[in-house]
Amino acid sequence: MREHVLKTRRTLPNDARASLSRAACARTLDLLDAHLDFSGERAPLVATYCAMKNELDTTHLIERLYARGAHVAFPCTRGPLRMEFMEVNEATWRAAAIDFLARPGRFFPDQDFPGLTAVDPEALDAIVVPGAAFDESGMRLGLGAGCYDAFLPQVRKGCLVAGIAFDEQLCEQIPADIHDRRMSVVVTPTRTIEPA
């Protein structure tokens, strides 16, 4: 299933991938606007990701989050089943001056990032999650390293967990293990799916 969906994603033309990414980001931002208070005393802490290869590009979402004053965190993978999120300011993100931003998906087991500390998973207000595939019940199929499978159980119950993908990545049913966490919502360029 993973190979089939990823092969389909690879066939999307670059211009289509860009416009579809923008549409999914706009839809995700609408969702975050409805669930989070960007005008409150405490700015929301939102985790997202920098796209690698032909993943859905979150650049538009990240730009809008910074413009709304959100604190934005990005994943740093330390190894299989080992991932933490670090808050990064807008200037650093734009410069892609940190290895885990410039080379997402790589492992950085022993590398320190001066000035950055991992955020407490329970402090996250929302997390935007990539995946190889999603289904309408909110189940997710990852890339196989298990990083999100290990991280997501650590976020608090009230955290909005939003899967994001192209429509071509939706599957009828994804097999679920006991450790898998269902998404609160799955967003594509054309749909916002809130599992019952």
Image (cartoon, helix red, strand yellow):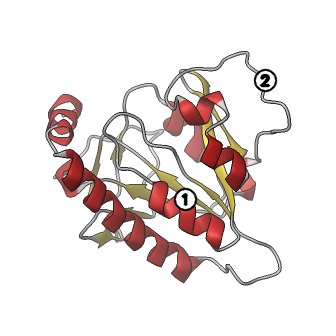
Is residue 55 at least partly visible in the picture?
A: yes
Tag 1 residue: 62
Q: CA distance from mark 2 to mark 1?
A: 24 Å
As shown in the figure, which amino acid type bears the numbered disc 2? Asp
Above-or-below relation of 24 to 164: below
Side of 74 where 131 appears, left or right: left
Q: Which residue is mark 2?
A: 112
- 15 and 112: which one is in front? 15
> Relative to residue 174, is residue 73 drawn left or right?
right
Decide which of 149, 13 is in the foreground and name it: 13
| Quadrant assignment, res 36 | bottom right
Q: Report the amino acid beneath label 1.
A: Ile
Q: Position of residue 67 (x, y in %)?
A: 63, 71
Mark 2 is surrounded, within 10 Å at the Cα level, by few (under 14), some (14 to 19) or many (20 or more) other residues, namely: few
Q: Residue at x 25, y 44 (%)?
A: 174
The relative height of residue 11 versus residue 47 in the rendered view (above or below) is above
Residue shown at 26%/54% (left/top)? 166
Task: Work out which quarter of the rendered image holds the N terminus and state it.
Answer: top left
**Tag 2's secondary structure?**
loop
